[in-house]
């Protein structure tokens, strides 16, 4: 199953706001998982902390990429869901 979350052209500020909001939701999710990790392995916590840092770095790259962009920015995002 695939969910088409975002598909379209946006001005740079709109694209940045949209993507930043989604990434912040994911970061908040990971932070909440870390808080609830009592009794789980330290490895799980470190994995989530590493992922938070990766996402923060990706946001920095995004800001650099479209900071002074005057053109439209195409944004496509989808979620793939599979039963395992």
Image (spheres, rainbow, N blue to C red):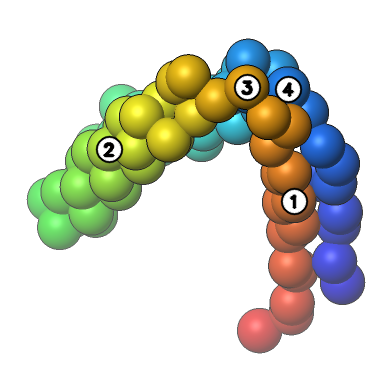
Question: Which residue is at 15% across, 57% downward?
Answer: 43
Pointer 4 or 3: first along the chain? 4
| Residue on which disc 4 sits | 11
Distance in Å between CA atoms under marks 4 and 2: 22 Å
Q: Residues within 10 Å of mark 1 (few under 14, many from 20)?
A: few
Q: Nearer the viewer, mark 4 or mark 3?
A: 3
Q: Nearer the viewer, mark 4 or mark 2?
A: 4
SS at badge 2: helix
Q: Residues within 10 Å of mark 4 (few under 14, many from 20)?
A: some
| Residue on which disc 3 sits | 70
Distance in Å between CA atoms under marks 2 and 1: 20 Å
* Tags 1 and 3 touching, CB below 8 Å: no
Q: Point out which mark residue 76 bears.
A: 1
Q: Is residue 32 left or right of residue 42?
A: right
Distance in Å between CA atoms under marks 1 and 3: 19 Å
Question: Which residue is at 48% across, 19% downward?
Answer: 68
Pointer 4 or 2: first along the chain? 4
* Tags 4 and 2 touching, CB below 8 Å: no
The quarter in which the C terminus is drawn is bottom right
Q: Nearer the viewer, mark 1 or mark 3?
A: 3
SS at badge 4: loop
């Amino acid at each position: 199953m695939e969910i088409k979350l975002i598909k379209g052209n946006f001005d740079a500020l709109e694209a940045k706001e949209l993507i930043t909001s989604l990434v912040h939701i994911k970061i908040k999710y990971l932070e909440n998982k870390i808080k609830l990790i009592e009794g789980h392995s330290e490895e799980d916590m470190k994995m989530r902390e590493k992922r938070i840092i990766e996402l923060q770095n990706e946001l920095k790259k995004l800001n650099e990429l479209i900071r002074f962009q005057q053109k439209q920015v195409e944004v496509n995002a989808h979620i793939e869901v599979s039963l395992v």
